[in-house]
Image (cartoon, helix red, strand yellow):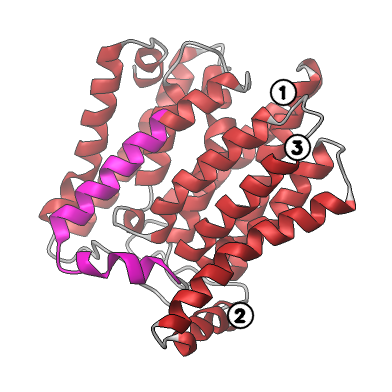
Amino acid sequence: MFVKFFKAQTPFVFFVLIIITMLLWGDVFISKNTNFILFNNVNVLFNLCFSWLENSKYISLVLSLLFIVIQAIWLNVIVVKSDITAKGTLVPSLIYVILMCSNQELLSFNGVVLSGFFILYTLQIAFSIYGKDDIYMDVFKISMILSIASLFYLPIFLYLSFVWLIIMIYRATKFRLIIISSVGFIIPYLYTLFFYFWFDKTSVFYQHLKNIFYSFGLHHFDFGIYLDYMPIMIACLYVVSVIGLFRKINSRVIKTRKFIYIITWLLFLSLMIALFFSDTTLISLGLLSIPATFFVSDFFLSFKRNWLAELIFLMIIIFIIVEKVLLLQ
């Protein structure tokens, strides 16, 4: 029902997408125990820019909900243009919304949700590089965008290696590109350092940087009431989707193969951040949602038996609803 309905790209489907997102967020608006805005020790700019929202529950939640809807539509455009999934479908946007709502702590205003815009812009530029001879400015843009994203959620600094991987995938490896990407990544940090220096808060900036290294290590996620079955189901879905797409990768054109390799590395680096460089909350798992949407969308759209795709999707929805009911008790 869901997958079949979202295969039709009509204006009414956009309206339904917004309604589904609002329904999935409904419990957060009425819950008294919700962390509606998440500050932590690995944000350099997020705490600084959005501290005024700390006591504004509904404004912060509406902003976050709006951001996810916008990102879902933007991501849908990128996924479809990449030719990884079928054209004329809004299934990727639905998948992204579901993945972002499968983690209760992501239903808040946080650095991961905000950084989604920067990651999407990065992918849009990365895909547009294919076939270009001069990619110096594009590499510089990508590096700066990811650097700014890391200032809102510091573990994203690991994505600097993602820029180098993009260069390698396009076989444009040149020492000059490595230097350009490194300089592009450093510049936003220099501006931020100058800002903290100007207001005599340099020690706070250094403390943020130190915290990310102190937090390094394999983290044990305390899912608590966030059912053990849910993360297992999502993890299995990711693995099966990746395997399924790579099994038929040789049938894709070279351009699409390169896009798949780029998404795969983004998924891998996001997983490394969630496991080794994140804070103690579950919000870092949200970084997996953007790259996973490419694979999961292809997984659901490749089913020859539509009823099976609908059944799996329905099971995910049921688990999310059960989790919300338990949290409200």
For marks 3 and 2, the one nearer the N-term is 3
Q: Is residue 323 left or right of residue 248?
A: left
Residue type of the residue flagged with mark 1: Thr
Sequence order check, earlier mark of 1 and 2:
2
Q: Which mark is residue 256?
A: 1
Residue bearing mark 2: 213
The residue where tag 3 is placed is: 135
Residue 324 appears in the figure: yes
x then y, percent, for residue 300: 52, 23
- Foreground: 7 or 214? 214
Nearer to us in this view, 219 or 172: 172
The residue that appears at 47% across and 32% down in the rendered structure is 75
* 231 drawn magenta: no
Quadrant position of residue 89: top left
On the image, which quarter does residue 157 sit in? Answer: bottom right
Q: Is residue 69 left or right of residue 155?
A: left
Residue numbers of the magenta segment: 44-73
Q: Quadrant of residue 111?
A: bottom left
- The CA distance from mark 1 to mark 2 is 36 Å
Q: Give the Cα distance between marks 1 and 3.
A: 19 Å
Q: Give above or below for 114 relative to 16.
A: below
Under tag 2, what secondary structure? helix
Say which quadrant the N terminus sits in. Answer: top left
At 64% from the left edge and 56% from the top edge, which residue is drawn?
Answer: 159
Identify the residue at image location x=44%, y=79%: 196
Q: Main secondary structure of the magenta part?
A: helix
Given residues 214 and 7, the one toward you in this image is 214
Instruction: Name above or below for residue 322 compared with residue 310.
Output: below
Residue 178: give x, y in percent of width and height: 81, 55
